[in-house]
């Protein structure tokens, strides 16, 4: 929205937000660009906005402020819903001794939930690299078979993999039998991502 010259932005701002707005305007007039997110209750709806306060310069001096306001309500609500769903999913996985983890093929790294430590005894940072995981957690007698199995699956562009029964070695040396499944996404070049 564009305001006429001489119109005060405070006239369009709820009184309880005046001090916060004035602080942001002062910072912008010092040459800083300020970004924030604001949640606004309007009737029975909650709206979310990204706000940017950007200095406007004349002859190298900040002489005004441009305020950009973008409605991000849909994105914020979807993120909130996704976060809540992930929390429920991880709670159920921990309670059931199921482990769900993700492999980042570009970084050659695993992302484990905290339940991994409870079941296998390793801190997740100890075995997050693929090579370390294979040489530490996978039983030595299963490593070659697993690597050959995965190579074949990747060559076939398998999207769902049901692994053979594998032996995992816990941090204290105990062997655990694991039945695993993977779901793999491939990029346009046909590489796992």
Image (cartoon, helix red, strand yellow):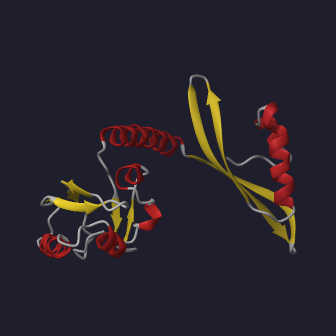
- Is residue 46 visible in the rendered structure shown here? yes
The residue most toward the top is 44
Residue 51 lies, with reference to residue 81, above or below; the image says below
Specify whether 61 is left or right of 121: right
Position of residue 131 measured from the top left corner of the image (x, y, whole percent): 33, 76
| Residue located at (12% from left, 74% from top) | 152
| Residue located at (15% from left, 69% from top) | 157
Q: Nearer the viewer, residue 132 or 24?
A: 132
Q: Nearer the viewer, residue 180 or 2?
A: 180
- Is residue 8 visible in the rendered structure shown here? no
Q: Nearer the viewer, residue 118 or 157?
A: 118
Position of residue 1 measured from the top left corner of the image (x, y, whole percent): 67, 46
Position of residue 102 measured from the top left corner of the image (x, y, whole percent): 34, 59
Q: Which of the 4 quarters of the picture holds residue 13?
A: top right
Image quadrant occupied by the C terminus: bottom left
Total marks drawn?
A: 0
Residue 56 lies, with reference to residue 17, above or below; the image says below
| Residue located at (32% from left, 51% from top) | 100
Residue 86 lies, with reference to residue 112, above or below; the image says above
Specify whether 181 is left or right of 59: left
């Amino acid at each position: 929205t564009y305001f006429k010259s001489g119109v005060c932005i405070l006239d369009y701002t709820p009184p309880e937000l005046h001090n916060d707005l004035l602080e942001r305007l002062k910072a912008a007039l010092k040459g800083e660009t300020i970004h924030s997110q604001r949640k606004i209750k309007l009737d029975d709806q909650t709206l979310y906005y990204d706000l940017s306060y950007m200095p406007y310069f004349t002859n190298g001096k900040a002489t005004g402020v441009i305020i950009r306001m973008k409605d991000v309500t849909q994105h914020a609500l979807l993120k909130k819903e996704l976060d809540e769903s992930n929390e429920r999913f991880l709670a159920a996985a921990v309670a059931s001794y199921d482990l769900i983890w993700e492999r980042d093929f570009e970084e050659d790294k695993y992302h484990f939930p905290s339940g991994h430590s409870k079941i296998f005894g390793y801190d997740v940072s100890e075995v997050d690299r693929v090579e370390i995981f294979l040489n530490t957690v996978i039983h030595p007698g299963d490593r070659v078979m697993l690597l050959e199995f995965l190579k074949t699956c990747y060559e076939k562009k398998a999207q769902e993999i049901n692994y053979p029964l594998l032996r995992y070695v816990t941090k204290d040396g105990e062997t655990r039998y694991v039945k695993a499944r993977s779901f793999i996404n491939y990029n346009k070049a046909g590489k796992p991502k």
